[in-house]
Amino acid sequence: MKKIIFPKNPETTKMIIVYGLILIGIISRLLPHPANFAPISALALFSGAYLSRKNAIIIPLAAMFISDIFLGFHVTMPYVYASFALIALFGYLLKKKTSFINITALSLSGSFLFFLITNFGVWLSAGMYPHTIPGLTQCFTLAIPFYRNTILGDLVYSGAFFGTYALINSYVLKPARQSLKT
């Protein structure tokens, strides 16, 4: 079996892995999937945990924009993009302690934030509902089935991104760092 060779600088290796996972997230959005079962929220959370604040916001928004070129643009894009930028900031809270509980809690919080912001945006700007309290209630009520998929997608993709990174870190990066010390 051929040995995998990584750059000698562990930070460079970390960035290669992080950006590789991000690329997988972008490609995943373009593949067929159930409505709202997408990787971008998890990508934003993951980017926030492992990238600088600026890159943590730019990466998910760039992923959205690139994939939207192929999927289409819509009137609620500012609300969608704003929610992902905020979720990236949530990920920044994981820089000090990435744990199953923290990742799950922030993933669920991001799902809820996305639900609130984007559905308010639909009500406000899509022209589908009257601009009344009953119209807002109807908008949020009809969005509930999509919310289930948002939660499931966010949890699955967050688990995949953070879990993959943790496994690579434990079995590839830590041994590589230790061998450099000896």
Image (cartoon, rainbow, N blue to C red):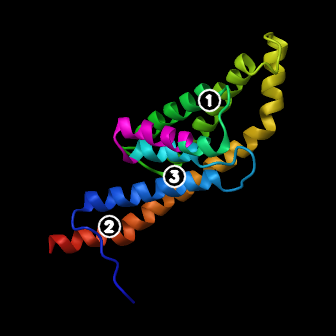
Rounded to the nearest angstrom, the CA distance separating label 2 from label 1 is 38 Å
| Residue at image coords 30%, 67% | 174
Q: Crowding near pointer 2: few (<14 within 10 Å), some, many (20+)? A: some
Residue 56 locus on image (x, y percent): 41, 40
- Point out the residue furthest to the bottom here: 1
Q: Element at badge 2?
A: helix
Indicate which label's residue lies in the foreground, 2 or 1: 1
Residue 6 locus on image (x, y percent): 29, 70
Q: Crowding near pointer 1: few (<14 within 10 Å), some, many (20+)? A: some
Question: Taking 67 as reference, is 57 left or right?
Answer: left
Rounded to the nearest angstrom, the CA distance separating label 1 from label 3 is 31 Å
- Quick one: label 3 or label 2, which is nearer the N terminus? 3
Contact between marks 2 and 1 (CB within 8 A): the answer is no
| Residue at image coords 73%, 38% | 147
Residue behind mark 2: 173
Residue behind mark 3: 100
- Quick one: label 2 or label 1, which is nearer the N terminus? 1
Residue behind mark 1: 77
The amino acid marked with disc number 1 is: Met
| Residue at image coords 27%, 71% | 176
Determine if residue 26 is in view: yes
Q: Which residues are magenta?
A: 50-65
Q: Crowding near pointer 3: few (<14 within 10 Å), some, many (20+)? A: few
